[in-house]
Image: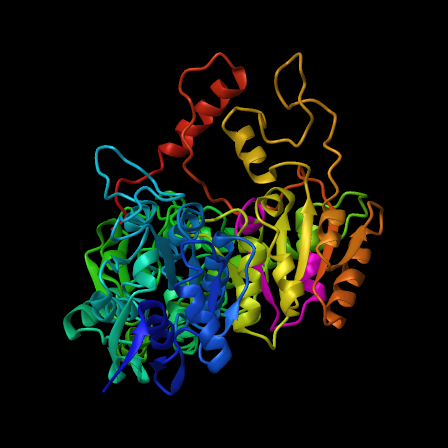
Amino acid sequence: MSRRMTVGQALVEFLGHQWTVDGDVRERTIPGVFGIFGHGNVAGLGQAIAQANALEPDMLPYHQARNEQAMVHQAVGYARMHRRRGTFACAASVGPGAANMLTGAALATSNRLPALLLPSDTFATRVSDPVLQQLEMPHDTSVQVTDAFRPLSKFFDRVDRPEQLFSIALAAMRVLTDPAETGAVTIALPEDVQAEVLDVPEEFLADREWHIRRPLAEHGPIERAAAAIRGAQKPIIVAGGGVLYAGAENDLRDLVEHTGIPVGTSQAGGGVLAWDHAQNLGGIGATGTTAANRIAEQADVVIGIGTRYSDFTTASRTAFQNPDVTFVNINVASFDAYKHGSQLPVIADAGEALRSLRTLLDGHRVSDEFATRVADEKKAWDAVVDAAFEPTGAELPGQSEIIGAVQGASDPRDVIVQAAGSLPGDLHKLWRVRDALGYHVEYAFSCMGYEIAGGLGVRRGAPDRDVIVMVGDGSYLMLHTELVTAVAEGLKIIVIIVQNHGYASIGALSETTGSQRFGTKYRTLDESARNFQGDEVLPIDLAANARSYGVDVIEVDPSASAIDDLKQAIAAAKASDRSTVIHINSNPLDYAPDGEGWWDVPVAPVSELESTQTAYDEYLVDKARQKPLLG
């Protein structure tokens, strides 16, 4: 049996009948579709979505967005909250609409989080070539904007003929639900093919289940890993997002409680243990805590579980200074398991590997001396955070005080959302996570503008939680229009704008590299100096901007009671059922406590600026600690 349908209609109905199964959990793989329509998709995919809405509105619900990049950010935020079991489809028109999704594609793939992208393409038949918004390349007239998705996607294909839809759609679903290969999945849809007709088999349109693979650890690798851990005097676990995506936080807790092995977390791994758990030393690496970094520095065995081992996690390969250090890398993806020259890769699901290790390490425990040192380092850092959170009474509070106020006013199941600027580093050190899914910092791509759109995705994925988005003024200005989406759908998020009057993070980095905050301040142009380094602050009003979108706005004025006022504002926002933006001015020069991590950002070795010369001398000292390989 078959049905006569357009390619767009067939794809929409197909997507509405896909299900992900993960153990006892069964949920829609694609719970909805975002779409901004133009001439490239309004008559094809747009018509199909409209028809589905009229006939069966719950099959593939449609959601508006204000920016194509933001659609992908929402899909990613949702995917993380659902531990990669589901994501949204994102439909864009030809040319600029499609190109706007490229940043989102790179973000999804970098974070190993699924997102289904459906960019439109120019006519496959080329009957009216060239069409509006077509990219013309004289050396290759087949190249279009959608080809730019190829290096950014974990899967890419183009439906040039209607008959290709079946194999392409099924292949796309395989990658979306593959724990090792997932990321941006792109199906390019020529605008004429979307509206072409074909006979669609009923079995293609029927419910289909995709079971997430949870590969077991092979006996040899896991036993060698266990032997290395048994022989360690100063082991440490580096826990990444793979622990959460496997739903393995309880397995991790069980292992560390029985062995006493301490844990440092990557940004994606925040939440694998509650902040006050005895084995949780907090963030590790360039933006980590002194507790995690001091233990890591002398560690003789490092057990990476579900981590990409980015340069921030390894402090640009300076975090692990023991000359005889051994790395055990447990990851569902072999690409990550073999990183940094590890000789003990274990390619397996994090939960399955942790349960195997728990059995193999039964009766094993770290020495009392090492356990005492771990406890002392944790206690010392906790005291540092307590002091950083203490209000100073300054009219312009530092970011640490602001984070402390947000922490104190939030509930354990609230989700903090962030992505770029100085906030990710400060949150990594300071935020006290109390729930496995309570910490959402997109730091694989660290995309400015992710926060509000990503926060909406988080809220869609966890409607029973308050979502608190913290965003600096620089990142807010990059992409804030999804506040309109929050109003349109009645989606409640709390957005805290930290007003720094410039790029606080890059400003600080600019100083350490000898450029003295050049180009990082929001100032009017100094015509004589031809720069923006003067004292005349831009008269922007971000609170008024947010208010114009229809959200509630609370302004915290500079005063000695600013922190108390912020706490009251958060309480009011949490009590409301509407989205609320809270605006507070901060002192960007009041830095968070140092966690003794380093990040490799090259400094010019030759310069006429004395500040750069000094910075280069300091850079060489840090660079000398860097290792070519870790394992």
Q: Quadrant of the N terminus?
A: bottom left
Residue 552 in the image: x percent, y percent? 76, 60
Residue 473 in the image: x percent, y percent? 65, 44
Q: Nearer the viewer, residue 97 or 466?
A: 97
Task: Specify whether residue 58 is in view.
Answer: no
Q: Is residue 354 above or below residue 476?
A: below
Q: Is residue 579 left or right of residue 240?
A: right
Most extreme residue toward the left is 220
Residue at image point 22% right, 50% down: 341
Residue at image point 28% right, 57% down: 154
Residue at image point 57% right, 35% down: 508
Q: Is residue 622 above or below residue 439?
A: above
Q: Nearer the viewer, residue 356 or 36?
A: 36
Q: Which residues are magenta?
A: 404-425
Q: Is residue 577 above or below residue 486?
A: below
Q: Nearer the viewer, residue 268 or 359?
A: 268
Find out whether residue 380 is within the magenta segment.
no
Q: Nearer the viewer, residue 13 or 244?
A: 13
